[in-house]
Image (tube, helix red, strand yellow):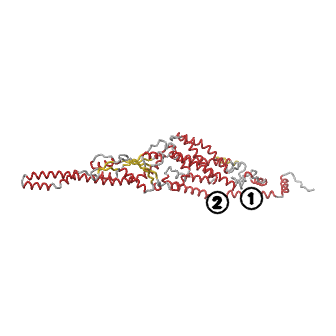
Amino acid sequence: MLDTPVYRKDENSIQQCIQHLFGGTMAMTTQRARNSSHQAAGKARGPFYSPIFWALPAVVVMVLAVLGTALYLGGLSNPAGHLKDFPVAIVNQDRGADVPSDGGGTEQQNYGQRIEDEFATEAGQDERLDLRQLTWDEAREQLERGELFAVVVIPESFSEDTVSMVKGSLTQESAAQPEITLYTDPQAGSLGTRVATGAVQPGLDEASSRMGESLVKSAESAQQQAYDQVLSELESQQDQQSEQLQRSAARGGPAVQQFAQQVQQAQADTPQQVADQLAPKVSSVSIDLLRDPLNVVIQPYQELEEGTALGMGAFYYAIILLVIGLSGSIAVNVLMDARAGMAPLEMGPSFRDLPRVSLPRWLTFLIKWGLFTVAAAPTSALMLWVASGVGMPVPHGVALFFAGWLSLSAVSAVVLALITLGGSAGMLVSMIYLVFMGLPSAGAVVPLQAVPDFFRVIAPIEPLHHIYMMVRSILYFDAHADAGLQSGVIGVSLILISAVLVALAGGWVYDRKFGRRGSRGPGKHAAHRVESPSADATAAAVTGGQPAVKSGENPNAVLS
């Protein structure tokens, strides 16, 4: 029978018993725990001494600054320099006028047609303009659908006013200056109106200059004809007086005849001198007016209602939808990940690390997106209520509600899909894609025809462009399908469906290849692993009896 030493029931006896039973293994375990503690402390200090810890955030900030500045200012800073296929129209309503011809009769002239032809020729040689020659009804229909930014209208009396201005320059009679009206689209915003005016005005100036050259020649020709007519009448009167003088002198003898001849010689240049004084002349002021005859009147086709922010209200509302969709989705992601134990939940001084719940990525996406989509309905209604309360006109509230709901859901699908595929980096990618790339390609601040080609190409895949087209159609164009509502609904819906499919497929592939979120291998999750009792005891000994929380495993809740 083994001799079992007898120990005293005191502290030293218990320690001797433990050392005898475990053969010193406890001391070794304690030593290893202390070494691990020192290593952990070194790792805790490590990030602050690493250059990457300080450099990486700064580099990210600088990269975002460069991208944001290059994309936003590069797309919007030079509208005139990037103008291409800018849609404008010209409407010629001129009925023409009778103009004196060289043969002494009259001929029909249509100066409005000349303006239209010259303007069309200039536009045909310049790819900046997409000039459409329309009737007034066609132009008005396209204006009401938002398809035109400007319409040049030549009135019915244009030729008559032009002819009267030439005549008035000779007769000093009052004459109307030929007028052309440039209608702009106020729904395009103040900058869009300026772009439209700047695009059309040079062509009108050139047409006015060419027309002015023709009118100056016509005025000079009319002046010469008036002089010739006055001179002819004076010469005819002089001839009659000379004949009467000769008949009278014939009865008076040689001396009287010689005196009559002297009188005729002295009056030989009188008709020219009198004609120079009596014939009408074109003044220098009239010449200057004829050189630039057109009076261009710029006015909006329709006056905007109060509360439309000078035509930018639709864009502001679209921006709010985008920002709420982006920030709201990030908030949903952070809160739900914290409640599922995927990240700490920190609220003020409270820091909670909850038990991890492992779900497939595709299912996590559906839960987050589904929650946001449900919340998006009352969110859209509240936005509509607040917008109406602050004075924004809402002519089609139901349509705007559903457009807002669809827009919020689509933006959320994009953001959560990028987070599903890219993790935390997906938030930055979302901001670059939706904001930095979306603002210049929206076609709101600057029309798409006045931005670089890159932004015209990406506009169909940018949610903000389609959201703006929907909202603009509802607020300004009576919710007309052809005014952007139909294309906007289709575009946003396609983006939503694509984002959902990409998130589901990508999440499934990630789960198959890398395992669920937080796991160390395919099909395993940290919350399902069982640590050895000795490891737990060692960790508890090091931490003073408290259960240790290991980085990346996030076990039971720990409050601190």
Q: Please tell me whether mark 1 sits on a helix, a strand or a loop.
A: helix
> How crowded is the residue under tag 2: few (<14 C-alpha within 10 Å), some, or many (20+)?
few
The alpha-carbon separation of the residues under discs 1 and 2 comes to 22 Å
Question: What residue is rendered at 54% in x and 52% in y?
Answer: 460
Q: Which mark is residue 196?
A: none
Query: Does 213 sit above or below residue 138?
Result: below
Residue 413 is situated, as x and y percent measured from the top left of the image, at 61, 49
Q: Please tell me whether mark 2 sits on a helix, a strand or a loop.
A: loop
Residue 468 is situated, as x and y percent measured from the top left of the image, at 53, 47
Q: The N terminus lies in which quarter of the figure?
A: bottom right
Q: Quadrant of residue 267?
A: bottom left
User: Which residue is farthest left?
Assistant: 253
Q: Which residue is mark 1?
A: 35
Q: Is residue 210 left or right of residue 194?
A: left
Q: 207 and 296: which one is in front?
A: 207
Q: Which residue is mark 2?
A: 50
How many tags in the picture? 2
Q: Is residue 165 left or right of residue 144?
A: left
Q: 460 and 245: which one is in front?
A: 245
